[in-house]
Structure formats: structure tokens, C-alpha cells
Image (tube, rainbow, N blue to C red):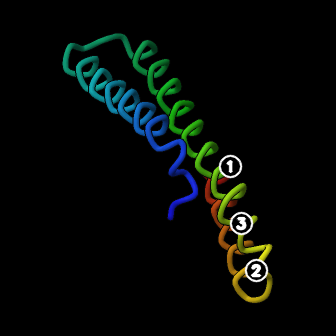
């Protein structure tokens, strides 16, 4: 079971809002909106996606990582490495 299952509807709503923002960005480009206004919306959309990513990471750490740590052994090591790699990807983005 996914660690975010209890927050699935919240994540879905957030992602639908991001989807709407992306459609809005497309309309802005199609209607020749001023560049700085588009960039402002790109920045807001990026922050919204980062909020989703951080929420998912938090859920993963509180559910999957804690459960694996309780089990110990190779599973715990693998989940810790997985979380570390995910954090590194987020920092690079």
C-alpha cells in the first residue's frame, strides 16, 4: 500500500490545480501574454509541484521508511538509500 493513501485526495486535488495552471500557461503563450507574466506563473506552478513532491516525500518517510526501519536489515537500508536518492533528485530539480 502506498504511504500517501490517506492523503490521496489532497494530492489529486493539488495535481489537478497544477494541471489547470499548465493549461493556463499554454493559453498565455497562445495569446501572446507578456513574458514576465508568463514567467511569474511558471514560477508559481513550479512551487506548486515542489509542494506536492515534498508532501509525497514526507508521506514516504513517515510511512514506508519508518516501517522499513522497524523491520531492519536489507529492506531498511534499501528504503533509506531510495529516500536519499529521491531527496537528491529534488534538490537537483
| Mark 1–mark 3 distance (CA, rounded to whole Å) | 10 Å
Q: Is residue 1 above or below residue 44?
A: below
Question: Marks 1 and 2: CB-CB under 8 Å?
Answer: no
Q: Nearer the viewer, mark 2 or mark 3?
A: 2
Q: Is residue 32 left or right of residue 44?
A: left
Q: Which residue is mark 3?
A: 65
Task: State which tag comes first along the sequence, 1 or 3.
Answer: 1
What is the number of callouts on the image?
3
Task: State which tag comes first along the sequence, 1 or 2.
Answer: 1
| Mark 2–mark 3 distance (CA, rounded to whole Å) | 10 Å
Question: Marks 1 and 3: CB-CB under 8 Å?
Answer: no
Q: Nearer the viewer, residue 57 or 65?
A: 65
Q: Which residue is mark 2?
A: 71
* Residue 75 percent location from the top left of the image: 69, 83
Report the disc number at residue 58.
1
Report the disc number at residue 12.
none
User: Which residue sits at x=80%, y=82%?
Assistant: 72
- Residue extending furthest bottom? 74
Amino acid at each position: 500500500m502506498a504511504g500517501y493513501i490517506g492523503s490521496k485526495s489532497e494530492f489529486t486535488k493539488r495535481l489537478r490545480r497544477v494541471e489547470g495552471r499548465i493549461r493556463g500557461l499554454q493559453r498565455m503563450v497562445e495569446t501572446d501574454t507578456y513574458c514576465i507574466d508568463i514567467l511569474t506563473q511558471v514560477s508559481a506552478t513550479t512551487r506548486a509541484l515542489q509542494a506536492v513532491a515534498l508532501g509525497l516525500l514526507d508521506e514516504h518517510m513517515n510511512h514506508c521508511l519508518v516501517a522499513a526501519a522497524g523491520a531492519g536489515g536489507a529492506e531498511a537500508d534499501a528504503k533509506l538509500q531510495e529516500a536519499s536518492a529521491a531527496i537528491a533528485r529534488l534538490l537537483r530539480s
